[in-house]
Image (spheres, rainbow, N blue to C red):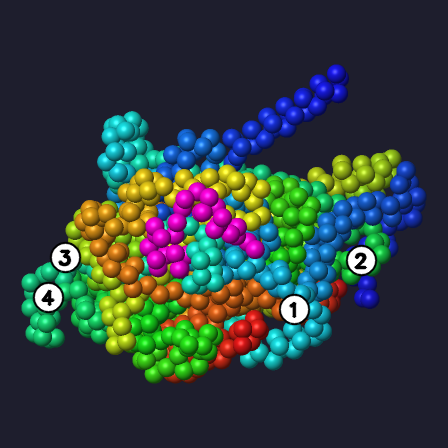
Amino acid sequence: MPTSPLDKVAHATPRPVARRIRGLTDRAIAWIFVAPTIFLLLAVNIFPLIWTIRLSFTNYRVNRPNRDVEWIGLRNYERILTDPDIWATMQATAHFLIWTIVLQVLIGFALAYLINKKFKGNDLWTTIIVFPMMLSPAVVGNFWTFLYQPQIGLFNYAVAFFTGVEPASFSMIGDVHLAPWAIVIADTWMWTPFVMLICLAGLRSIPDTIYEAAECDRASKWRQFWTITVPMVLPFLMLAVLFRGIENFKMFDLVVQLTGGGPGNTTTLTSIDLKREAFEKWRTGLSSAYAVILFVTVFGLASIYVKALNKVKER
Amino acid sequence: MTSKLLKSTALALVVSGAATAATADDLTLCWAAWDPANALIELSKDFEGKSGHDMSFEFVPWTSFADRMLNELNSQGQLCDLMIGDSQWIGAGAENGHYVKLNGFFDANGITMDDFIPATVTGYSEWPKGTPNYWALPAFGDVVGWTYRKDWFERPELQAEFQEKHGRALGVPSSLEELKDIAQFFQGRDIDGTTVYGAAIYTERGSEGITMGVTNALYNYGFLYENPDKPYDVDGFVNSDGAIAGLEYYKELYDTSVPPGSSNWYMGENIDAYRSGQVAMQMNFAFIWPGVEADPNVGGGKSGYFPNPAGPAGQFAQLGGQGISVVAYSEKQDAALEYIQWFAQPEVQSRWWELGGYSALKAVVEDPDFATSQPYAQTFLDSMAIVKDFWADPAYADLLLPMQERVHNYVVAGDGTAKEALDGLVRDWIEVFEDEGKL
Amino acid sequence: MSAFSVTEPSSRTKWGAGILVVAYALITIVPLLWIIATGFKSPTDSIAYPPKVLFEPTLEGYVNLFTDRTRATQDMLDRAGPPQTWYEVIVRKRGTIITGTSRYGERFLNSVIIGFGSTFLCMVLGTAAAYAFSRFRVPLKDDLLFFILSTRMMPPIAVAIPIFLMFRQLGLSDTHLGMILLYTAVNLSLSVWLLKGFIDEIPIEYEEAALIDGYTRFQAFYKVVLPQAATGIASTAIFCLIFAWNEYAFAVLLTSGTAQTAPPFIPTIIGVAGKDWPAVAAGATLFLVPVMVFTILLRKHLLRGITFGAVRK
């Protein structure tokens, strides 16, 4: 296991200090502090997860209470992994995931960088920018269908105003080519502020002394940006990407309200597909296997990512 | 002595406990969140006054109604004492023991299914279909029909232009072909300075929307759910030449006559499009008609109504509507049955119609004044006479899902051909039936 | 910071940055303003074709949000008599009559209890755990931290069925406590991870000094670390509140009569024909207010981010 800088800090706790503590040892306090969190997570997350794993090896269906439940081994997994539709769903998810992250990181970082120039009134405008992420995703999805309506919505008229095309000539959620972008736009509108805030925190954590030193060394602004700003913000940016990635991998409410997965299956993300299996077809066993596969995928990707994150932090 | 006193006290306690339980139940009725639900709250005040029970209501929007309520039933939840469940749930309700069988109760209280519109009894109450086993009382009759802009249809200049183009008057279409002509006639037309479109039709993907829409074309072109002589034999019936022509018809309607962006529309979106003056016609369930009549933009005589027009293979319309059932997991079944008994009374049913609820009681709809009581009453009667419903098997959800997908992918996303879509559907359905042990 | 600092951007840079940020803010706020405006439209104006930017404002949406109505028959109108209040006047104009209050108020209150309750619990547990992870040698620390993070990776739909059954067994189904625990669990990963970052930045020398002064560990945590971490706790609290406040998937599957929050309720608001967009918009607008206020109040903390005092001053 790589030792993180945090471990080093803990190691560095001077012995005499540790001995000073009356009553409880550090170890006991550590456990008292950590245990409630771990316990709650075990009860609310891990227990259901184990249950789900167990169900994934059965043909159980919640809506067939009278049918015998059989152990069917890996058949559910086999069925899912050989289903071409699921791979199409994965592609839709990947498109959504990649583009939302790219756009949100670019726009979010740029905004944070500009706000960090500390122009007058910057916190008023920052607060305004943050508002969209305070809305409920279900409400956002709902209202964006309304905004995207070519006849009664605002979006097409706004595009028409700036580009001169006919408002009714395109339909963001009705067109198989535009719909995947429609969900990217709505999600980016809503969540760019999240990335921006984390970047801002990162930018403000950079001590001015570093720039002052660079200035003394006559490093150009451009060079300062690439050798100081970017590397110092990178851990924060990666954390933001991690959280957005996880959230959008399981994206459900916004997209289901916005497009319902259509047209065709063009915006059927894995969570929407999973929900169909679990709560519409009621294939509990099969959907449990599906859930486990998704979980393993995101868990695997995230653990690789966190390793990289720790490496970046150590530098 | 003491023990006698104790016994009588205990008895008194039991009796009083039973008495309070009998008089002060709080019943919860579950239904979809829509217009008729508001009317039912008002109607139920009479029941609360007469029975002493309190009524609570749990309304879930249509698009998540099935998920939420079937989840409740499947987990044997006690939230709902009364369920106005969708017609297609009746098989699952009966076979999985979610609903209480009502035959004994009907017999004991003089309620007979002969008093209700036959189509609603078959559609909402019976399982297995065609047998006298009742699991619900028909509560709300509903059927897909069409609404049109009478004020536009009657404009002389449009009348003249249509006459010239098609050689007949612009009016209520007598066939689906004619309906398409009219829709195409209005598509993209400028009326009072805005561009309007032909028709709003169901295309929704997520729940049941496009299926409830496309069946109105499929039935009338010759689609059958199964071999009339051999249950669950679907190949050659679901994908017959007629069925293929029906599906192609619906796609052509979608490609040539609907507002841009109507790729995921169901009841609510169609209403919005119609009320805001985007379309000349809309396909929708009958429940919306009272609302259309009352609308400041399109109500008050500006709108007309007609049943789903005939096709080459006959005239049918998609059944909607629900029956009211007692949930088997409820601990207040007696009070729930009281509600049904009260609801079945002719006075209550006729007030139900007055408030905007479509009563299925013959005494109400066969009343000589019924047909003229509202502009849409006759259309409702005509439509209820030609209904057909989707599968109501316990596996209905498994059958609906592939239909939604296949049809939506062909009609809206333009994948493949109509034949491929229906052949695919046949394969999906056979798989479901095999899985269910029906084949 | 002195005005002559080499790191202070030039005024031209500031202007340029300001203009770009303001432009973005103005564009991004339009959809939100549209929602707020829709709340003050009449149902007809809300779906006007083409859309109306200028309209006659009405409170109909707000009236509809708080009442249940049904289409009035003549005998109902006769019985009710002439309208008594301004809101009855609005409702009668549509040919409808008020039959009772809607459940929006209840749902809103549920959201307040569950949203703030879970945020509070999450901060208590999260701060303690983050402190422990930051300062102590917890066995398998990295694994535990990753485990905590991993609990956020499961799609809600995937665990909804077991949680539903488990809650039913424990009597937590459709209760405030059940939802508070659930949202706390979902948010813990975010709070532990963010707070650990904040606490890592607090110089350990402070506590050492405190310990040398005779404070116990608890006292050092309570009197030294917590005040230092206040900004971090505040900004983490905002994120947790936003999530718990707006959560939809669990709420729609696990709550109904008693503990249902507002997000699953708002889209169910219906009018006399089709969806009542003004009432939905009104409901969404009012629902936005508490988080907005909370965020504006804590704005300094949110925006100051991780600019912790001592070391840098």
Say whether marks 3 and 2 touch (CB < 8 Å).
no
**Is B15 or A271 nearer to us in this picture?**
B15
- Name the kind of residue labelled 3 in the image: Asp
Is the residue marked by circle 2 packed among few (<14), some (14-19), or many (20+) residues within 10 Å?
Answer: some
| Left or right relative to B411: residue A49 | right
Q: Quadrant of residue A260?
A: bottom left
Could you tell me which residue is drawn at 29 percent across and 73 percent down? Answer: B220
Secondary element at image label 4: helix
Residue at image mark 2? C141
Q: Position of residue C217 (x, y in %)?
A: 83, 40
Q: Which mark is residue B158?
A: 4
**Is B204 or B340 nearer to us in this picture?**
B340
Q: Position of residue B115 (x, y in %)?
A: 34, 50
Residue at image mark 3? B151
**Residue A94 within the segment the image draws in magenta:** no
**Residue B108 within the segment the image draws in magenta:** yes
Q: Nearer the viewer, mark 2 or mark 1?
A: 1
